[in-house]
Amino acid sequence: MSFRTVTLHSVALPSHKGSRKGGSLGELHENTQPAPEVAMCVSSLLHRNMTLQDRAEAGLAGFLSLDLFRMVAEEKAEELAVPRGSLFMSGQTCFNIQGVALSATVLTLCKDANWHPWKQGTCRLSELPVEEWFSLLRRQSSSSQLSARGYFAAGARTMMKHGKLLNNEKPMERKPEKSLTEDECLDRIGFAVFAWIRWSL
């Protein structure tokens, strides 16, 4: 099954098991959380092996489907006479996730051909590497509490260790990966919009 097929079929409307007579608000809230669409938004920026075309398509499809889910949740909240926004993620969370998808789409259009942020490391376009680095430094302290002096000393030791490891590795072969043209991006936008319209009818 191609990525395009997966994208199309994952943009699905949420199921609502609850009603006024049965089902708690918590159950309703759980059933209106669009996990596949959130995954599309996040993977478009962090997944290692996706092509630029797939990143653009996943990000745009995820962005649009979150809008669709929010509208469906608002209609359902009105139908069930529950507070507006109680059946979906908070507006700020939705805004942040959609921002991730848009960031990935922009990168597919303007990245340098020799810049490869996805091939090495772990989630380099997020704050996770920073957290992992700080964790490495804290482990060198018996109390996990670092003074300024301890931080710089631990950082120097860790960098020297990693430097030796890198010197023993063969350079990674990197093939240039050109950014998408406007026509290629528009093609992906067209499919993402088609998927959005198909499932909103």
Image: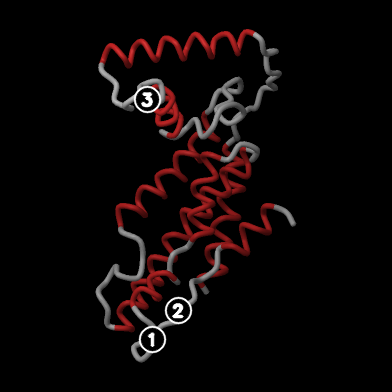
State the SS at label 1: loop
Q: Which residue lies furthest to the right in this view?
A: 1
Dot 3 or dot 2: first in sequence order is 2
Front in this rendered view, residue 158 or 81: 158
- The residue under label 1 is 19
- Spatial CA distance of label 2 from label 1 is 8 Å
The amino acid marked with disc number 1 is Ser
Determine the residue positioned at 62% across, 45% down. 54
Residue 138: numbered disc: 3
Query: Alpha carbon of mark 1 to alpha carbon of mark 3: how far?
Result: 50 Å
Q: Is residue 123 left or right of residue 120?
A: left
- The amino acid sitting under disc 3 is Arg
Disc 2 marks which amino acid? His
Please name the residue shown 70% across and 22% down the image. 175
Question: In the picture provided, is 72 more to the left or to the right than 80?
Answer: right
Secondary structure, mark 3, is: helix
Q: Please determine whether, in this image, residue 50 is positioned above or below residue 30.
A: above
Q: Which colour scheme is used?
A: secondary structure
Location of residue 177 by image quarter: top right
How many C-alpha atoms fall within 10 Å of the one at disc 2: few (<14), some, or many (≥20)?
some
**Residue 155 place in picture, x, y as percent:** 40, 14
